[in-house]
Amino acid sequence: MATTPPLDPNRCPLCGQGNQCAMEVEKATGQKQPPCWCTHATFSADLLARIPDTLRNQACVCAACAAKTSA
């Protein structure tokens, strides 16, 4: 039986690249971070719909994937 590898909250659920999430950095290091880039970003419904159900609300989308749908 195949098992799914654990989700890395530092990786984009769409492309697998680093998502540069300041909130995850703060969790991991305990060091206060400036507001994450994503707090100022707009994520389209189309982009959010592309995230597999099992990965939703588990990890941040990266800036590159977010930019692809906002253009």
Image: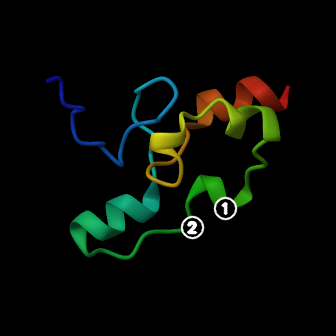
> Which image quadrant is residue 27 in?
bottom left
Closest to the observer, 53 or 41: 53
Which amino acid, mark 2? Answer: Pro
Horizontal and vertical percent position of residue 54:
45, 42
Which numbered dot is residue 11? none
Question: Which residue shows up at 57% across the image and 67% down it?
Answer: 35
Mark 2–mark 1 Cα distance, whole angstroms, equals 7 Å
Mark 1: secondary structure:
helix
Q: Quadrant of residue 31?
A: bottom left
Q: Name the residue under label 1.
A: 39
Q: Among all residues in the image, which is located at the extreme right?
A: 71
* Vertical comparison of 3 with 48: above or below: above
Question: Which residue is situated farthest in the left direction here?
Answer: 1
Q: Name the residue beneath numbered marker 2.
A: 35
In the rendering, at what x and y percent does residue 70 appear? 82, 32
* Residue under the image location 63 percent in, 53 percent down: 38
Residues 71 and 16: in front is 16
In the rendered image, the vertical position of residue 12 relative to residue 9, given as above or below: above
Position of residue 36 measured from the top left corner of the image (x, y, whole percent): 55, 60
The mark lying in front, picked from 2 and 1, is: 1
Disc 1 residue type (three-letter): Thr
Counting from the top left corner in percent of width and height, residue 19 is at 46, 40
| Figure quadrant of the N terminus | top left
Residues at circles 2 and 1 in contact by the CB criterion of under 8 Å: yes
Report the front residue among 11 and 26: 11
Residue neighbourhood size for the residue with mark 2, other residues' Cα within 10 Å, grouped as few (<14), some (14–19), many (≥20)? few
The residue at 46%/42% (across/down) is: 55
Q: In the image, is residue 40 above or below residue 11? A: below
